[in-house]
């Protein structure tokens, strides 16, 4: 992969609730022909099993059929996305657990998700975290503020009430659009796949 348009987006999936957000983002990236390299923690796969009708294995097979998708195990620290010499268009961690927020904010790279996020920080590539936790305590807020000061986009999956969503899928679609915008990829979306409404 050499040209910028062929460089992948890295998607990390952690064990926070909100598996639908990860699935929707990957679907949207692949629909817009943006390659994806993904990794998921064991806790993420457990949450996926609880929350999603489609099994994680079936989703992986479906994504791999696109020809633009690669998956790496969380312990696979020899994966390309663990190295800054491998070019990517950035990374989204969605949903992002508070444990992952804490690890990334303190430079702990003990699995592939955290290492890939650390690579984005050191290489100054876009990094978007979609945290799922409420209420937030002072430690959570301090960790997110520390990352925000480094240029990380903290993007809580807030419902777009002004668009009057009718389902969880509507909200997930909106969040996926916002993540793509934060990664600088909004131009890749066809007009009919973009969310309108007032700017927020």
Image (cartoon, rainbow, N blue to C red):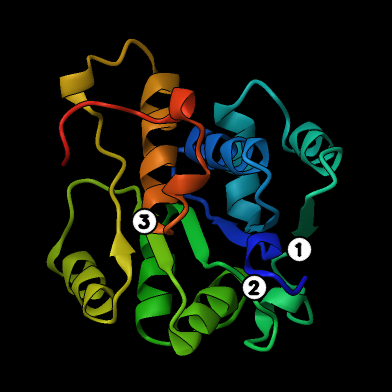
> What crowding class fits label 3: few (fewer than 14 Cα within 10 Å), some (14-19), or many (20 or more)?
some
Residue 54 in picture, x, y percent from top left = 70, 24
Identify the secondary structure beneath mark 2: helix
Identify the secondary structure beneath mark 1: loop
Q: Residue at x 74, y 74 (%)?
A: 2
Residue 75 in picture, x, y percent from top left = 73, 72
Which residue is disc 3 drawn over?
A: 182
Which residue is disc 2 drawn over?
A: 112
Q: Residue furthest top?
A: 166
Task: Using the numbered discs, state the Cα–Cα distance from disc 1 to disc 2 in whole angstroms.
Answer: 8 Å
Identify the secondary structure beneath mark 3: helix
Residue 133 in picture, x, y percent from top left = 29, 48
| Up/down of 176 relative to 164, above or below | below
Between disc 1 and disc 2, whose residue precedes? 1
| Up/down of 89 relative to 190, above or below | below
Which residue is disc 1 drawn over?
A: 73
* Quarter the C terminus occupies: top left
């Amino acid at each position: 992969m050499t040209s910028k348009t062929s460089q992948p987006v890295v998607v990390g999936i952690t064990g926070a609730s909100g598996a639908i957000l990860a699935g929707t983002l990957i679907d949207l990236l692949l629909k817009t022909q943006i390659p994806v390299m993904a990794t998921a923690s064991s806790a993420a796969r457990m949450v996926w099993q609880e929350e999603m009708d489609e099994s994680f294995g079936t989703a992986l097979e479906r994504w791999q059929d696109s020809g633009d998708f690669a998956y790496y195990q969380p312990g696979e620290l020899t994966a390309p996305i663990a190295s800054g010499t491998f070019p990517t268009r950035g990374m989204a961690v969605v949903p992002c657990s508070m444990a992952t927020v804490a690890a990334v904010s303190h430079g702990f790279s003990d699995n592939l998700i955290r290492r890939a996020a650390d690579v984005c920080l050191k290489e100054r590539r876009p990094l978007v975290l979609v945290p799922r936790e409420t209420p937030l305590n002072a430690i959570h807020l301090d960790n997110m503020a520390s990352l925000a000061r480094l240029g990380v986009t903290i993007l809580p999956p807030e419902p777009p009430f002004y668009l009057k969503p009718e389902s969880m899928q509507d909200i997930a679609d909106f969040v996926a659009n916002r993540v793509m915008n934060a990664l600088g990829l909004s131009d890749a979306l066809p007009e009919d796949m973009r969310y309108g409404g007032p700017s927020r």
